[in-house]
Image (tube, rainbow, N blue to C red):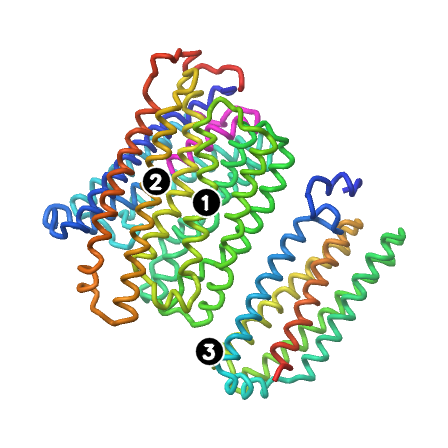
């Protein structure tokens, strides 16, 4: 890990990317999966606009917007953690990662309240295609937020620059996916 | 062959080839029953013939994997196998279990659950065999050099044993029964066996092209991560309309579509390595099987799998001959060919024969592969016609079976070609050419 360039050489196009090259394989795979799921959502909506619009009206756009802000802020903290680490400030970098984790955890809290509301109102994964996809896509994303927080905790602990870049890359992907999920599922009419 | 214990692979490869012959003969017989439906209906009913065909396949592939592990782990770890005695005991126990199972099937002794028909005591014996093997290989790995190839191979083999444990869980609810049933053979072929296959191919490519191990290992990591990412949830494409919740249609469709990627990566990897490293290794036949495996695995598992993996398409094709077409080319391309590749590579070393007796082996490659590809095409045509007549037009199953009978005749003929290819392979692997000399026999000798 000490010599970054040597460690990451020979990976072809992946060599020039920050962090561990295998993380980028994962990121591309994730983008493909969520891309396919959101495309599937768009097609399913086209086939049954009425049900989708009626179901979408039950979602809470405020919670969605709040969580967008939460993830972006957390992402900023993770980016700053990498920035200060590359300037050589290891302990400040740790603190930025801790902020990223704390703010990121708010996302889970908000989402759990949101899921609880939906389930109380009687909307579950079998209600209709809209809710099947709502639960699958946001649930799969939720799982990635949990994974991301664990990864951030690990790289805050073992905070070499390469590890921090790897963790931050994953975390930004989680951001990016939410920024696509939110408009497609919550906003588009 | 550098290490004395590599020769432990020899009986495993022999048993694998023996059961391979039994498997394709069973297949030929089953294919003939499709043409003459009442053939042997009383003596050996179709379900028993099919059982022998599928069980022999899986068991010989396992013999091949065990053999491959005993052959390549010493070279990779640069140390002898931990206990040759365990390896020999394991061989005889497994062979006895396999023979007892087949014999039992002929007398109607089986548990009926597809692919898991073995009586309970044989299942237990399989677990014992697996544990002996894993203990032996893991101990070898622990004391020796740890390479990506051997680690991934062993990881795949542990996964194989782990998922087999679901064979013991048989809930009375039919939907749950089916749900866990898929864990055994299908989390193998779409998950852990792919790791085994990638590791064996990587070993062969390192040996035959002399390419830098570091490059191969990087590819291996990419392939393995893609395999596990897509394959485990991609297995959800088996959960369409079998009583499982509807969301599996989305999970299965999306992830299994991406299962094409690791297979495509293997093709790119194999050809890139050969282009960079050169293909002037004297064992041309092993090179042919290695590259053929990458290509036909991509078509059989990847392309033919994708063909009917999306839920709206599978709604029509579920359980038709399209599935049979995919199953045949996927098993052949991925797991039969990788076994034949390592056997072709290792046998001349194990038997100490030089130079390689290749021409016949390469003929068997082309004959067997053409037969399998033609069989796949006839089954695909039968499947498409069947889907249209039965599922779209609503004609009854038996009437449709008559309509697609012509394709079963063609399939039967391609089966004959495959059997000829298999017999030729076995002959080519075990025979002694006049031009060959025995160099050192089963004794250790300098590495290639």
Whether marks 1 and 2 lie on the same chain: yes
Determine the CA span between mark 3 and mark 2.
46 Å
Residue A126's label in the rendered image is 3
Residue under mark 2: which chain is it in? B
Q: Is residue B79 inside the magenta stretch?
A: yes
Q: Position of residue A72 (x, y in %)?
A: 76, 70
Q: Position of residue B121 (x, y in %)?
A: 29, 45
Judging by the rendered image, the residue that carries numbered circle 1 is B193
Q: Is residue B101 visible?
A: no
Left or right: where B100 falls relative to B302: left
Subunit of label 1:
B
Q: Position of residue A132 (x, y in %)?
A: 50, 76
**Dot 3: element:** loop
- The residue shown at (80%, 50%) is A161
Total labels drawn: 3
Discs 3, 2: same chain:
no
**Residue B364: within the magenta?**
no
| Image quadrant assignment for residue B285 | top left
Q: Which residues are magenta?
A: B62-84
Which residue corresponds to the image point at 36% horizontal and 57% vertical from the top-left?
B181
In this view, the mark in front (1 or 2) = 2
Q: Badge 1: few (under 14), some or many (20 or more) residues near its Cα, within 10 Å?
A: many
Instruction: Specify whether B10 is left or right of B220.
Output: left
Q: CA distance from mark 3 to mark 1?
A: 34 Å
Query: Where, by quadrant of the figure, is residue B219 drawn?
Result: top right
Query: Which label belongs to residue B370?
Result: 2
């Amino acid at each position: 890990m000490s010599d970054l360039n040597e460690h990451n050489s020979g990976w072809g196009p992946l060599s020039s990317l920050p962090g561990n090259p295998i993380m980028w394989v994962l990121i591309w795979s994730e983008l493909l999966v969520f891309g396919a799921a959101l495309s599937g959502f768009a097609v399913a909506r086209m086939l049954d606009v009425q049900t989708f619009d009626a179901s979408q009206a039950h979602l809470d756009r405020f919670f969605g917007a709040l969580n967008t802000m939460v993830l972006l802020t957390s992402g900023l903290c993770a980016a700053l953690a990498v920035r200060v680490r590359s300037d050589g400030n290891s302990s400040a970098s740790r603190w930025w990662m801790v902020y990223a984790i704390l703010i990121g955890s708010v996302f889970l809290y908000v989402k759990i309240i949101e899921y609880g509301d939906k389930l109380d109102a009687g909307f579950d994964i079998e209600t209709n295609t809209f809710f099947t996809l709502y639960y699958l896509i946001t649930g799969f994303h939720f799982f990635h937020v949990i994974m991301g927080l664990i990864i951030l905790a690990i790289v805050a602990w073992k905070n070499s620059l390469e590890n921090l870049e790897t963790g931050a890359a994953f975390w930004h992907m989680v951001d990016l996916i939410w920024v696509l999920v939110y408009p497609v599922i919550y906003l588009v009419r | 062959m550098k290490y004395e214990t590599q020769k432990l692979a020899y009986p495993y490869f022999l048993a694998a080839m023996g059961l391979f012959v039994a498997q394709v003969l069973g297949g030929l017989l089953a294919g003939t029953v499709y043409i003459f439906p009442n053939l042997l209906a009383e003596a050996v009913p179709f379900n028993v013939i099919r059982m022998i065909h599928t069980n022999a396949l899986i068991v010989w592939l396992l013999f091949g994997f065990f053999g491959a592990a005993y052959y390549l782990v010493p070279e990779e770890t640069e140390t002898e196998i931990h206990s040759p005695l365990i390896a020999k005991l394991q061989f005889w126990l497994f062979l006895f279990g396999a023979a007892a199972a087949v014999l039992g099937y002929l007398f109607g002794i089986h548990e009926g659950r597809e692919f898991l028909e073995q009586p309970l005591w044989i299942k237990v014996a399989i677990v014992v065999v697996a544990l002996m093997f894993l203990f032996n290989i893991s101990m070898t790995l622990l004391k020796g050099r740890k390479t990506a190839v051997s680690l991934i191979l062993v990881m795949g083999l542990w996964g194989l044993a782990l998922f087999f444990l679901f064979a013991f869980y048989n809930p009375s609810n039919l939907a749950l029964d089916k749900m866990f049933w898929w864990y055994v053979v299908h989390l193998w072929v779409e998950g852990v066996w792919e790791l085994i296959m990638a590791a064996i191919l990587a070993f062969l490519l390192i040996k035959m092209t002399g390419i830098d191990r570091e490059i191969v290992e990087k590819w291996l990591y990419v392939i393995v991560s893609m395999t596990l990412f897509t394959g485990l949830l991609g297995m959800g494409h088996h959960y369409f309309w079998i009583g499982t919740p509807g969301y599996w249609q989305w999970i299965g469709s999306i992830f299994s579509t991406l299962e094409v990627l690791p297979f495509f990566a293997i093709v790119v990897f194999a050809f890139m390595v050969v282009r960079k490293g050169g293909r002037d290794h004297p064992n041309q036949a092993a090179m042919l099987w290695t590259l053929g495996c990458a290509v036909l695995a991509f078509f059989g598992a990847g392309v033919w799998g994708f063909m009917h993996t999306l839920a709206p398409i599978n709604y029509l094709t579920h359980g038709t001959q399209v599935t049979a077409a995919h199953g045949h080319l996927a098993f052949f391309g991925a797991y039969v060919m990788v076994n034949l590749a390592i056997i072709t590579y290792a046998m001349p070393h194990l038997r100490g024969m030089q130079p390689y007796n290749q021409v016949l082996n390469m003929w068997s490659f082309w004959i067997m592969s053409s037969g399998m590809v033609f069989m796949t095409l006839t089954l695909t045509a039968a499947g498409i016609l069947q889907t249209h007549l039965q599922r779209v037009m609503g004609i009854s199953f038996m009437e449709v079976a008559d309509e697609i009978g012509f394709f079963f005749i063609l399939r039967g003929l391609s089966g004959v070609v495959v059997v000829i290819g298999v017999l030729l392979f076995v002959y080519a692997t075990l025979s002694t050419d006049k031009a060959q000399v025995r160099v050192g026999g089963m004794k250790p000798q300098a590495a290639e």
